[in-house]
């Protein structure tokens, strides 16, 4: 699953912008999860205001999506295919999850 | 390395609070990284204002630390042992990293 994720650190613009932190624990078995997760990443990337995605999973999974505005986050949340995936996630894929909407105020790094 | 991380979703309080997103790509070899990473987690947990930590690594590593205030983040950043670890990180452990300081504005989840 995680092998499908982009392995680069997102090249986000100067703050402020927004981050959606999605932390999750999976149920057992794939049940169509990997394919949908890959599709959701591709779909998110095409949405207005998308700035980047970073993802990793061991026992705990963390996916962070970066967006230009709260409006962009809201639009992506309401995407029809994404709504169906959210429903499957609640019913089947996740034992538990937490979503945090954050404003990125400061950013720095090695390069 | 990631087997040492807590595998639970952080039980953070009602927003607003702060998140420090640390995204990294490692260099080859351990070079004392695992031991220090474990120590830094234990040390962070003892600091005033610490609210939780979530971590996962595949090719990309993501660690998110939750804090009650920007002051708490600044205090942790200036911890002597942590400063030494930051230096080793820059010199030896990380091929690249990015740190994002965020204000968590909204939070929801399954439970």
Image (cartoon, coloured by chain):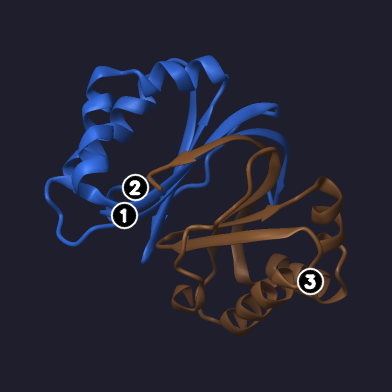
Chain colours: A blue, B brown
Q: Which residue is mark 2?
A: A5
- Gap in angstroms between the C-alphas marked 1 and 2: 5 Å
Residue A11 appears left or right of B67: left
Label 1 in the same subunit as label 3? no
Determine which residue is flagged by label 3: B82
Q: Are marks 2 and 3 on the same chain?
A: no
Above or below B51: residue A78: above
Which of the 4 image quarters holds residue A25?
bottom left
Question: Horizontal and vertical percent for residue B5?
Answer: 51, 72
Q: Tell me: residue B1, above or below residue A49.
A: below
Residues at marks 1 and 3, CA–CA distance in whole angstroms: 30 Å
Q: Identify the secondary structure beneath mark 2.
A: loop
The numbered mark 1 sits on a residue in which chain?
Answer: A
Is B106 on the left-hand or right-hand side of A93?
right
| Neighbour tally class for label 1: few under 14, some 14-19, many 20 plus, Cα within 10 Å | some
Q: In front of the other: label 2 or label 3?
A: 3
User: Would you say A101 lies left or right of B110 here?
Assistant: right
Q: Residue at x 57, y 21 (%)?
A: A68
Q: Secondary structure at mark 3?
A: helix
Residue B36, image x, y percentages? 66, 80
Q: Most extreme residue toward the left, as rendered?
A: A31
Q: Residue at x 31, y 54 (%)?
A: A2
Determine which quarter of the picture holds residue A12: top right
Residue A1: x percent and y percent? 25, 54
Is residue B63 at least partly visible in the picture?
yes
Q: Residue at x 62, y 71 (%)?
A: B93
- Which of the labelled discs sits on residue A2, or is there none? 1
For this rendering, which residue is in front, B27 or A5? A5
Q: Report if the CB atoms under discs 1 and 2 are less than 8 Å apart.
A: yes
- Judged left or right of residue B49, residue A78 is left
């Amino acid at each position: 699953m995680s092998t499908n994720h982009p392995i680069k650190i997102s090249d986000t613009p100067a703050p402020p912008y927004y981050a959606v932190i999605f932390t999750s624990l999976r149920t057992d078995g794939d049940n169509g999860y990997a394919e949908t997760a890959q599709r959701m990443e591709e779909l998110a990337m095409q949405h207005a205001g998308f700035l980047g995605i970073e993802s990793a999973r061991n026992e705990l999974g963390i996916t962070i999506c970066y967006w230009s505005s709260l409006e962009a986050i809201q639009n992506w949340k309401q995407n029809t295919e994404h709504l169906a995936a959210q429903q499957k996630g609640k019913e089947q894929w996740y034992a538990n999850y937490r979503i945090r909407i954050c404003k990125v105020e400061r950013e720095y790094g090695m390069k």
